[in-house]
């Protein structure tokens, strides 16, 4: 399965790329500079320079783009729109690395994790930017997208167990009342979704058991 990873040098992107290589996928890393990922094949291009021909031969495109500073947060929406426009009307799947802040905390889906009084103030702008990008993505019925939210505690250096709980739109806790997942296990879930998933035009979430 031919898979592209946009932002393959990033924290999540590098783990996802490594997992794709480990699983034997035909993976191409898309990076802005030197390729530091596990992929042997790579393309050096800014995301806004990508054109339809760059992505036309892939079965799946994984969007692991990340922006963290106040002035770059709007890029979550802008880059996602650009990728959607490139993939519009095709059978190429788009899998988006999302955040946990937009997960719902009530059955009516009127309250989100980021609305809670104990949600860290420093993370609210990022959560809001990712939630906005998701809202805009929901309007795209011309793209076979899947938005994948991690658990609340997203652990960059956590171990790879190869196990996780697949959940939906609502914030979910494991049997111990915890919400965490390592980047490595999140990567397992993403690649499982690439290979086996049928969650087209849906947001799903994953957490450790």
Image (cartoon, rainbow, N blue to C red):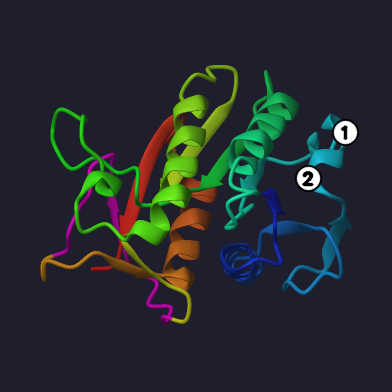
Q: CA distance from mark 2 to mark 1?
A: 13 Å
164 drawn magenta: yes
**Over which residues does the magenta segment extend?**
158-174
Q: Earlier in the sequence, mark 2 or mark 1?
A: 2
Residue 104: quarter of image:
top left
The residue carrying pointer 1 sits among few (fewer than 14), some (14 to 19) or many (20 or more) residues within 10 Å by Cα, namely few
State the residue at coordinates (61%, 55%).
66
State the residue at coordinates (49%, 19%).
139
Residue 199: quarter of image:
top left
* Circle 1: element type: helix
Residue 28 against residue 209 in the figure, above or below: above
Residue 191 coordinates in the image, percent (x, y)? 53, 56
Residue 1 coordinates in the image, percent (x, y)? 67, 49
Residue 52: quarter of image:
top right
State the residue at coordinates (48%, 72%).
184
Q: Which residue is mark 2?
A: 47
Residue 192 coordinates in the image, percent (x, y)? 47, 55
Examine the residues drawn in magenta and state their main secondary structure: loop
* Circle 2: element type: helix
- Identify which residue, 154 or 146, lies in the foreground: 154
Q: Which residue is mark 1?
A: 53
């Amino acid at each position: 399965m031919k898979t592209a990873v946009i932002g393959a040098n990033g924290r999540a992107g590098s783990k996802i790329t490594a997992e794709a290589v480990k699983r034997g996928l035909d993976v191409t890393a898309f990076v802005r500079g030197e390729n530091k990922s596990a992929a042997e094949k790579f393309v050096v291009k800014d995301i806004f320079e990508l054109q339809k021909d760059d992505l036309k031969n892939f079965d799946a495109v994984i969007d692991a783009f990340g922006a963290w500073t106040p002035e770059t947060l709007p890029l979550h929406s802008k880059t996602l729109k650009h990728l959607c426009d490139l993939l519009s009307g095709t059978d190429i799947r788009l899998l988006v690395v999302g955040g946990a802040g937009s997960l719902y905390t009530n059955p009516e889906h009127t309250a989100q994790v980021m609305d809670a009084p104990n949600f860290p103030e420093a993370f609210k702008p990022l959560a809001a930017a990712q939630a906005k990008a998701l809202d805009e993505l929901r309007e795209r019925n011309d793209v076979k997208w899947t938005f994948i939210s991690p658990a609340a505690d997203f652990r960059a250096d956590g171990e790879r167990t190869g196990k996780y709980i697949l959940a939906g739109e609502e914030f979910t806790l494991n049997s111990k009342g915890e919400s965490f997942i390592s980047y490595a296990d999140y990567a397992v879930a993403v690649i499982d979704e690439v290979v086996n998933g049928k969650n087209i035009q849906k947001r799903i979430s994953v957490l450790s058991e």
